[in-house]
Amino acid sequence: MIRGMDKTVRHIRIFKPLLMLLLLYFFIRIAFGQFILSYIVFCFLLILLYFLLARITFLQSFAYISISVIIVSLLMSLYGISQYVGLLPSGYLFKIVGNFDNPAGYASMLSISIPFVCYYVFLYKRNASTLLLWIIYILIMLAIILSASRTGILASVTVTIIYAVKRYKQHIPNIPLCIKCFFILGIVVAIFTFYVLKKDSVRGRIIIWRCTWEMVKEEPLFGHGYKSFKAKYMLYQAKYFEQNQESGYVLLSDNVKHPFNEFLLLIVEFGLFALFLVFLFVMQLIFMYRKRQTDELFTLAMSLLAVAIFSSFSYPFQYPYTWFISFFCVMSIFFVSKKSQYKIRWLSKSLILMASISLLYITLKEMYYENKWYTVVKKNELGNMQEIMATYSTLYPHLKQNAYFLYNYAAKLNYWGYYKESSSLVEECEDCLNDYDVQMLKADDYFRVKKWDRAKKCYNMAYFMCPNRYMPLNQLHKIAVLENDSNEARKMACLIINKPIKIPSATINKMKQKMREYLENEINNAEQ
């Protein structure tokens, strides 16, 4: 018994150094970049959560958090269902998003919460509230299904099956073999159905993973750096389509800001070394869980499993909820292994106070400047140009690390004819975000000042980033006409006419018709 306890203590002591090593490695990789402030804020938040969990017993924290999670999940599921039936307004592009920007964030939040509901449904003592909890579970599952998130359905169903097996494992040997086979067949059919229903989505992710792997091969050990995916990935996608112009993936191309796999993103930005550290950290967690296998810890492990499933096919860590639940699960597994409650001494209290004040200051500052930006964005384009430009100029020192602010600022300058200044801002934006829209804006800046060679380079880059788009070819045709390059103009016209259409629109039809008229005029002029 004592030998086993000594072994547990050793692993607990290893846990903290591993966590510190992981955070220190990330800090070193980020310290020389422009996003160090966001990482410091993240670390401050972890410190506060750490001491918060240390002050209360595990069962108390589990009860508080689990009940809060269930209530929030219930409200969010009702929100989504109301959107589906039309009682509440839907999202801009998707029918069910809750208060998220897309179904992925909505479904990830509900799926990660499902284990806390299953704990009370399957493992907790039966009482009068069991029926109510079953109703909550059904509503949450219904919301996940209506969101049409395949990853959400996969994660929540997997977790539910594991809970059911744990609850009724003594009855499993008595289940007839034919029923077991039918159940396995049902799982296979469901997976196949997921693929068939959104076949293009699956194929689209395959090409994203393929291009991402090219990034990994260039910097495998330590990665390209924090937030480098948004800045560099589309260049790799452009290179792929430039070399494979007849690829069957052309119509599936689009702007990509995440590889739809958190593990791949970790490797791209921080390298295989970071993945190795995370692996060691997870192994320690598993060991500590196995030493204290309670129903509560099982629930935390299932929530982390849901996070892992979602991380394999989506981007749950783009949302603060995932960070909070994951950190709660990890720290709870750690603290439940400790014999006594952690005592906060004066140095720790000072650290908490400093972290709290810093977080409050940074948060309020960011809120203030982003609210000012939101206000100026909403102003009418025909409003006072000088006033709007002055506001952007004032905001620039405070929001210059925000790629979307830089792009928006550059677009405003382009709209009002400040093409040189717009081009300079776009180049800054490229260090944080470089995609089809950025290249098209940069190309337009050069086009307006008649720098044709630079404009053509950017239009070509934009085209190969998303080769299913027509506008780059149309602009290249315009430049060819302006340069009196009839061969290039005819080539662009033929490309536009023969190009397959991904989503039919009046604009594309008009563009194709214009190119046909151009070729007819060229033929008539040649005959004369």
Image (cartoon, grey):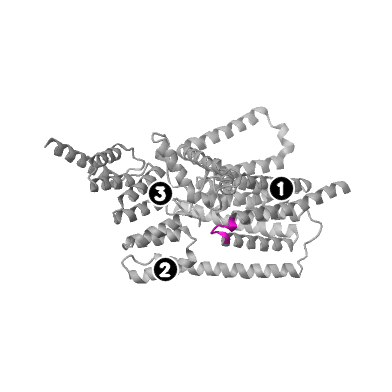
Which quarter of the figure has residue 252?
top left
- Crowding around mark 3 (Cα neighbors within 10 Å: few <14, some 14 to 19, many 20+) is many
Three-letter code for the amino acid on which mark 3 is drawn: Tyr
Q: Secondary structure at mark 3?
A: helix
Which one is in front in this view, the residue at disc 1 or the one at disc 2? 2
Q: Quadrant of residue 355?
A: bottom right
Residue 159 location, x and y as percent?
A: 64, 44
The stretch of residues the image draws in magenta is: 30-36
Q: Is residue 235 visible?
A: yes
Q: Is residue 32 magenta?
A: yes
- Secondary structure beneath dot 1 equals helix
Residue identified by numbered label 1: 298
Would you name the residue on which mark 3 appears? 436
Magenta segment includes 248 = no
The mark closer to the camera, 3 or 2, is 2
- In 3D space, how far apart are the residues under numbered discs 1 and 2 (Cα atoms)? 53 Å
Residue 10 in picture, x, y percent from top left: 80, 50
Q: Say which quadrant the C terminus sits in.
A: top left
Image depth: mark 1 or mark 3 in front: 3
Numbered disc 2: secondary structure: helix
Mark with earlier residue (1, 2): 1
